[in-house]
Image (cartoon, rainbow, N blue to C red):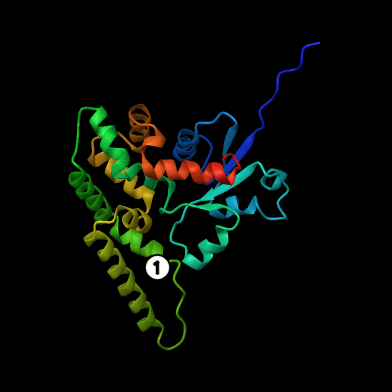
Amino acid sequence: MPKPPSISPTYTLFCPGRPDSLVEAVYRWVLDDPRIVIEPVGGHEAVLARFTGAHPDGRARSGRAAGVVDRDAYPDAILARQAEVVHVLPYFETESYLCHPALLGPTLAQLGRPRATDALWAELVSSARATYVPAVNAHLSNSPKPTGRARLEAMAAQYAEQLAAADAVLEGDDVDALLRYFPGRRLADRLARQLDFLSPQHLLECARAAVRPAEVVPLAQLRAELRGRLHLG
């Protein structure tokens, strides 16, 4: 009697976002494994909730599930605790990966619109400048809320600190630092249009046709880290 066909185990990656969103498409592309189900579950806290003992869905504790959350503007101490149970992105958001020159360069070259690395960095900085105030406000929203008589002075000091942090990123030449500080969704939207893509979704479609994630160092690292969380080696 012939053996029944073996069924490959299914793994689940819980991620932020909505079904059929750009975020889901990015993780599906990066992992490219039919055994892995990408399951968007909403926001940051919704992903973390899958890994708490109170959540009724047992998949997160089955050994064949993992979670990934955006870095956002959470303090390092909070992110360190979250990293014990889910993978925390090194960048602000999933969309930040679409803004990396290592992805944009070969994508534009494939389209017959090559750009030098310096030119791509200038475009990235230009997009970041256009999202300067929302980025600063995002980081301020996670700063401790001052109280007492010196509250206004403390708030002014926090604001000045974030302005200095944003300016330092823009004046430097560290791509990772920029993608860590500035919100990726806003960056991707502006940068895609600056580079003559219809939208971030269009940019992703073109990138998928031009490069393999294994050829782009940040994407290759993300793939390895998520597969490790899923115990896929």
> Toward the viewer: 111 or 228?
228
> Toward the viewer: 233 or 5?
233
In the displayed structure, 211 sits above or below 223; it is: above
**Total numbered circles:** 1
Asked if residue 49 lies left or right of residue 224, the reply is: right
Crowd around label 1: few <14 · some 14–19 · many ≥20 (10 Å) = some
In the displayed structure, 179 sits above or below 142; it is: above
Q: Which quadrant is home to the N terminus?
A: top right
Q: Please provide percent x and percent y for residue 10.
A: 65, 33
Query: Label 1, on which residue?
Result: 140
Residue at (44, 57) in percent of width and height: 72
Residue at (48, 41) in percent of width and height: 223
Residue at far right of view: 1
Q: Which quadrant is home to the C terminus?
A: top right
SS at circle 1 = helix
Amino acid, disc 1 = Leu
Q: Please provide percent x and percent y for residue 218.
A: 39, 45
Residue at far front of view: 233
Residue at (24, 53) in percent of width and height: 125
Residue at far top of view: 1
Asked if residue 76 lies left or right of residue 177, the reply is: right
In the displayed structure, 179 sits above or below 18; it is: below
Q: Please provide percent x and percent y for residue 110.
A: 26, 28
